[in-house]
Image (spheres, rainbow, N blue to C red):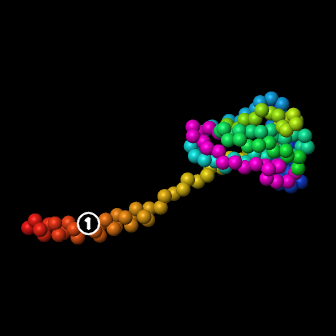
Amino acid sequence: MSFVKAVCPATDDHSLLGDNLLECVTDDWSLLFAGLTPASYTVSVYAPEHLVVETGEMTLNGVVLPNLPGGIDTLLLGVSYGTIEAPVIDGTLLIASDGVGIGGSCAGLAGVQVQQIPAAVPSLQPVATGILLIALFVTPGLARLRAQRR
């Protein structure tokens, strides 16, 4: 695995896609992110702009992301980047590939972006309304019960 830092001042897309995190790997490779909060994450992976370097098929915690051919210096979903939702249960996110692009070309990776998907916050309004309704129906009944006991 080689890490290459390229300086590409042309455009933001060009800078991202021209700055390879993994360049022309021909063996299995993996990236492990640890210390993550158990949740669902949106993971975006970016293919190198080099014409012969693809990403190869990857798995993200077991979820398959197909090969991205790359070869362009602009962001195009399914070509230069892919986005997938991946679960994180034990605090780790593993991105792995066999290092082979379609047709046997070498594989690479220009970048990775990991974003936690915010958990849905349950609404307290129905609970409070339910408690209020119980109070309205139970209180008069208790008052009648007390009156009958006297």
Q: Is residue 145 above or below residue 38?
A: below
Nearer-the-camera pick, 58 or 24: 58
* Residue occupying the point 75% across, 45% down: 45
> Can residue 2 be seen by looking at this rendering?
no
Residue 114, image x, y percentages = 68, 47
Question: Which of the 4 quarters of the picture holds residue 50?
Answer: top right
Q: Position of residue 28 (x, y in %)?
A: 77, 30
Residue at image position (61%, 44%) is: 87
Crowd band around label 1 with a 10 angstrom C-alpha radius: few (<14), some (14–19), many (20+): few
Q: Is residue 110 magenta?
A: no
Q: Amino acid at mark 1?
A: Val
Residue lying furthest right: 51
Q: Foreground residue, 87 or 3?
A: 87
In the image, farthest residue toward the front: 103
Residue drawn where x is 87% and y is 40% of the image: 53
User: Is there any visible trace of residue 84 in the rendered image?
Assistant: yes
Q: Secondary structure at mark 1?
A: helix
Q: Which residues are magenta?
A: 73-93
Instruction: Indicate left or right for 133 with 125 as reference.
Output: left
Give the residue drawn at x 22%, y 68%.
141
Residue 75 drawn in magenta: yes
Q: Residue 31, how many percent across, how many down?
A: 71, 36
Residue 95 vertical placement versus 9 (above, below): above
Q: Which residue is mark 1?
A: 138
Residue 107: quadrant of the picture: top right
Percent of width and height locating residue 62: 66, 38
Quadrant housing the N terminus:
top right
